[in-house]
Image: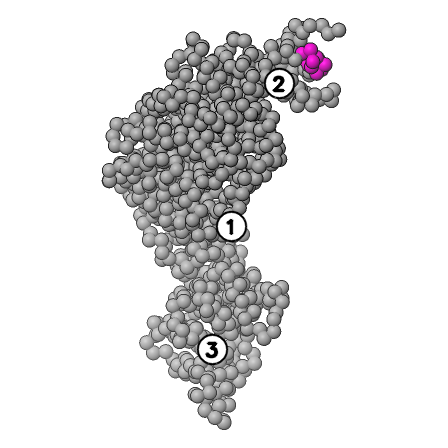
């Protein structure tokens, strides 16, 4: 690896991006240049020695056997777009104008200093692009013509010796086909002339060097590997012709491509099959001879050059360059807005090649040309400001960009970014940019009148999974059906039923997508709210004199937003299956599209909510396969969970699934009003984040949320995490924690700590979010963001989300509504009551403390971490004291052991357990 240049390098936005002559500081590969210069000096020494030998030969023609073959080709290795052509074009200039510090590399070598000072020692011939040579032109003739042109450019009348040598060389290059060679002695003489071409070429170069007063000729040869049909013939010309000390081939290309071309040639032109291993070795040996390994150099990678590169416009002026790292960070805020890089949400924009980098940084150039203040705001030394201040300045500059010219600059950037992503197969970026453009048009940010989307989340390409099934399959597409089957196999670990097999059958056809998506949200049996529970809960709310009208409407909406019965099933039950897709869709739609205005289709907020409630949940099995039936029960489980009477009742009440259609209609209008009110209250932050672009953030939130939802539904948490209080209210609160934590984990500035934790499988969740600080991820990710002194749209967005109506359907003062799972028909005491009321809801179910003690595996060998965790989990259960007293007579030994261990290890709050056990009746 070459040493990285220690001076400032420039990327000039005013350049066209094509290979052209550049100032020294705009040529980045100084390390490669030093290597090439050193190799050229060594080749010059060899050429001087060889010229001295020729000068001592009275008749070179008579000493053809003393010709020297010198394989001294210098190879510049690099991928397509690395800047090899620009390097070759600027090499002579850098050779002649190398800075004083670069000469110091040869300070101890007197001969090298003399060579460097005498810049006339080499004749740099014009760059040769073999792809521009016509098929009927020989590459060897082209090389000779270049040398002769250099002589004619200097001398009007070359010497007679030179002209005779040129004529003699021309004879050896004449065609040798049978029609032009004659017969007999003429044919023999023609072969003799052709065989003498090597010494004639050496002699020609020797005389040409004398004519020009140089030591050797540098042949710049670029892109041989792109002339695929003639590549091997060109390499053979290099091997035969330029193995001369007077010629120094300087060749650029990708060595891996050269190797493949050589292997292909040997495979196609061998009379007998060659073993693959031997063919690879043969190709490698061929390239080692043609391009000796000690004469190969590779460009310094952009990742190492980045700290030294500054972006400039026009002539560089002190203090006006933007460090490339700052420029790319600013661009990342434009194309990957509102994310911090966690879980790949903000991938590096630094490409592998110079060509791609130049094309990338030019995307926002029109804005920077016209907005000089924006340029000045970015052009500062990275060490001048603390990291947090730097991030805020970059974010502020990005906000100014999207607001400028009413979003016109952003629209231009999105168009260019789409083309860039398509060219580099960044399908996630392409789909998001496409969706942002469509969303901007629907919101009226462009010239045309707004055309609001009917169902934004389902119509935007980045979230439309079905739309990508019809795209022709490509090797880099993602196996969506495989991801879904992987999730179904997780379900099978705990249960094996017809409903799993029927959902697996939907994925028999291989489905691939351009971008990665989470698995669908599946129907999981027993995760439902029965009709009996619905009726009893409604009856309880109506009988409760403390229940307000809004509380009842919230309960109706809670049931309809977090459950679904719009599906094709084979059973006769009308149970409501727990699904989170509807709530997720409503949440994101209200973030993306404004329903608070009174114009056009935006007045249809209530209609929009009604469509969400009456259609299959977003990104669910039923949404993707709407006409395919799914087994919605298991015969064994049904027998244990439903009575025949309940089944008949469910089948006869299909028309009244909501309990009351009038109440549902009123609840929809109430929710629509609440959503509009929420949008008005948070209009400022919603406008800011919509201008920045929400879809990139929401795409990653979508993936993370549904991955955790699937983990929640695959495990036992929905049925067992709360024991006797396992309700739809708790499921909604769990969904709230998952979504907001996901948003915060991507939204939190990347100089702050982020906790990556699966909050879907944590301990019991309290219905009051104010008590969630015991969860580490919630405390650091969500609460930590709100505690920042410098608040911006990120913190404001998190605060706004926590007050969204989707999350305010749960009353923290109640113990939860709508018990999840099978309930006994004769359970008349299923009513979830307010805190302080009789805990009769626990009667039909196993006490949660008993469940915890059964699964804890407590023993005399349990150490401090296990004891601490068990005690903490126990005390996190609502009403744990009374529940512990209920089970204490049966679990006295386990509770006594837990207390003993807690006191031994000085676990906090152990005294609380001691106080509870002190109330336990003495056992006989």
Q: Residues within 10 Å of mark 1 (few under 14, many from 20)?
A: few
Question: Magenta region, mostly helix, strand or loop?
Answer: helix
What SS does tag 2 mark? loop
Query: Gap between marks 2 and 1, in whole Å?
Result: 70 Å
Q: Residues within 10 Å of mark 2 (few under 14, many from 20)?
A: few
Q: Earlier in the sequence, mark 2 or mark 1?
A: 1
Residue picked out by circle 3: 201
What SS does tag 3 mark? helix
Q: Earlier in the sequence, mark 3 or mark 2?
A: 3
Count of picture labels: 3
The residue at the point 50 percent across, 86 percent down is 191
The residue nearer to you, when weighing 831 against 285, is 831
Q: Position of residue 553 (x, y in %)?
A: 39, 19
Q: Residues within 10 Å of mark 3 (few under 14, many from 20)?
A: many
Query: Gap between marks 3 and 1, in whole Å?
Result: 38 Å
The residue at the point 46 percent across, 82 percent down is 172
Q: Position of residue 540 (x, y in %)?
A: 47, 13
Q: Position of residue 344 (x, y in %)?
A: 48, 39
Q: Residue furthest bottom?
A: 184
Mark 2–mark 1 CB contact (< 8 Å): no
Q: In the rendered structure, which segment of residues is drawn in magenta?
A: 888-897
Residue picked out by circle 1: 3
The residue nearer to you, when weighing 691 against 576, is 576
Give the foreground label among 3 and 2: 2
Q: Is residue 674 visible?
A: no
Residue picked out by circle 2: 846
Q: With respect to residue 845, does 616 lie above or below?
A: below
């Amino acid at each position: 690896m070459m040493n990285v240049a220690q001076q400032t390098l420039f990327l000039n936005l005013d350049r066209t991006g094509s290979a052209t002559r550049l100032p020294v500081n705009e040529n980045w590969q100084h390390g490669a240049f030093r290597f090439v210069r050193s190799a050229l000096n060594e080749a010059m020494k060899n050429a001087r020695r060889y010229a001295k030998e020729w000068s001592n030969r009275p008749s070179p023609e008579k000493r053809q056997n003393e010709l020297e073959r010198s394989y001294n080709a210098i190879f510049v290795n690099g991928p397509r777009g690395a800047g090899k052509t620009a390097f070759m074009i600027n090499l002579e200039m850098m050779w002649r104008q190398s800075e004083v510090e670069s000469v110091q590399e040869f300070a101890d070598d007197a001969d090298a200093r003399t060579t460097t000072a005498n810049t006339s020692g080499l004749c740099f011939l014009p760059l040769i692009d073999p792809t521009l040579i016509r098929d009927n032109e020989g590459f060897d003739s082209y090389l000779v013509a270049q040398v002769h042109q250099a002589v004619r450019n200097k001398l009007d009348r070359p010497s007679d010796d030179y002209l005779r040598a040129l004529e003699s060389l021309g004879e050896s290059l004449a065609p040798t086909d049978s029609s032009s060679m004659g017969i007999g002695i003429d044919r023999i003489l023609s072969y003799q002339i052709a065989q003498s071409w090597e010494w004639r070429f050496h002699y020609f170069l020797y005389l040409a060097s004398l004519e020009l007063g140089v030591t050797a000729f540098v042949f710049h040869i670029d892109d041989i590997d792109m002339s695929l049909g003639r590549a091997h013939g060109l390499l053979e010309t290099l091997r035969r012709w330029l193995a001369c000390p007077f010629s120094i081939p300087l060749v650029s290309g990708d060595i891996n491509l050269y190797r493949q071309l050589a292997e292909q040639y040997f495979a196609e032109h061998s009379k007998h099959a060659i073993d693959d291993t031997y063919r690879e070795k043969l190709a490698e040996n061929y390239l080692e001879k043609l391009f000796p390994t000690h004469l190969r150099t590779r460009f310094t990678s952009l990742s190492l050059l980045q700290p030294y590169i500054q972006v400039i416009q026009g002539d560089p002026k002190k203090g006006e360059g933007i460090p490339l790292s700052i420029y790319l960070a600013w661009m990342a805020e434009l194309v990957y807005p509102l994310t911090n890089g966690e879980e790949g949400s903000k991938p590096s924009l630094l490409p592998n090649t110079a060509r791609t980098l130049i094309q990338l940084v030019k995307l926002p150039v029109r804005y920077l040309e016209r907005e000089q203040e924006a340029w000045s705001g970015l052009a500062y030394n990275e060490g001048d400001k603390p990291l947090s201040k730097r991030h805020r300045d970059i974010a502020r500059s990005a906000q100014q960009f999207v607001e400028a010219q009413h979003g016109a600059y952003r629209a231009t950037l999105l168009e260019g970014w789409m083309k860039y992503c398509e060219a580099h197969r960044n399908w996630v970026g392409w789909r998001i940019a496409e969706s942002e453009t469509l969303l901007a048009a629907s919101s009226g940010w462009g010239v045309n009148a707004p055309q609001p989307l009917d169902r934004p989340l389902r119509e935007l390409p980045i979230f439309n999974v079905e739309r990508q099934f019809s795209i022709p399959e490509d090797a880099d597409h993602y196996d969506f059906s495989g991801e879904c089957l992987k999730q179904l196999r997780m379900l099978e670990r705990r249960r094996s039923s017809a409903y799993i097999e029927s959902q697996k059958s939907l994925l028999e056809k291989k489905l691939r997508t351009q971008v990665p998506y989470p698995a669908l949200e599946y129907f999981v049996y027993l995760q439902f709210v029965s009709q009996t529970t619905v009726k009893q809960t409604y009856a309880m709310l109506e009988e409760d004199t403390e229940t307000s009208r809004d509380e009842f409407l919230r309960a109706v909406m809670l049931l309809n937003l977090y459950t679904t019965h719009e599906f094709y099933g084979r059973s006769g039950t009308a149970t409501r299956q727990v699904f989170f897709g509807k709530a997720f869709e409503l949440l994101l739609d209200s973030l993306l599209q404004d329903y608070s205005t009174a114009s056009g289709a935006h007045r249809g907020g209530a209609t929009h909510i009604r469509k969400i409630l009456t259609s299959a949940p977003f990104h669910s099995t039923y949404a993707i396969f709407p006409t395919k039936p799914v087994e919605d029960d298991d015969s064994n489980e049904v027998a244990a969970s439903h009575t025949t009477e309940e089944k008949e009742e469910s089948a006869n009440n299909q028309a009244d699934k909501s309990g009351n259609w009038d109440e549902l209609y009123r609840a929809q209008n109430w929710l629509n009003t609440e959503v509009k009110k929420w949008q008005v209250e948070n209009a400022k932050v919603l406008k800011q984040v919509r201008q920045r672009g929400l879809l990139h953030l929401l795409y990653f939130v979508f993936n993370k949320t549904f991955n955790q939802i699937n983990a929640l539904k695959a495990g036992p948490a929905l049925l067992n995490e709360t024991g006797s209080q396992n309700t739809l209210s708790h499921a909604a609160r769990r969904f709230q924690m998952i979504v907001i934590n996901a948003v915060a984990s991507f939204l939190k500035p990347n100089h702050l700590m982020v906790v990556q934790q699966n909050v879907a499988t944590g301990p019991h969740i309290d219905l009051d979010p104010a008590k969630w600080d015991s969860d580490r991820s919630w405390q650091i990710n969500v609460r930590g963001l709100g505690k920042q002194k410098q608040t911006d749209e990120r913190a404001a967005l998190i605060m706004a989300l926590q007050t969204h109506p989707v999350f305010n359907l749960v009353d923290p003062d109640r113990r939860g509504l709508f018990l999840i799972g099978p309930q006994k028909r004769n359970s008349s005491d299923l009513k979830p009551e307010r805190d302080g009321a009789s805990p009769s809801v626990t009667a039909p179910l196993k006490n949660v403390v008993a469940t915890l003690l059964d699964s804890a595996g407590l023993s005399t060998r349990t150490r401090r971490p296990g004891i601490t965790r068990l005690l903490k989990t126990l005390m996190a259960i609502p009403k744990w004291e009374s529940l512990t007293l209920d089970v204490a007579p049966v679990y006295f030994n386990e509770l006594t052991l837990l207390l003993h261990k807690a006191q031994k290890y000085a676990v906090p709050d152990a005294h609380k357990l001691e106080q509870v056990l002190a109330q336990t009746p003495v056992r006989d």
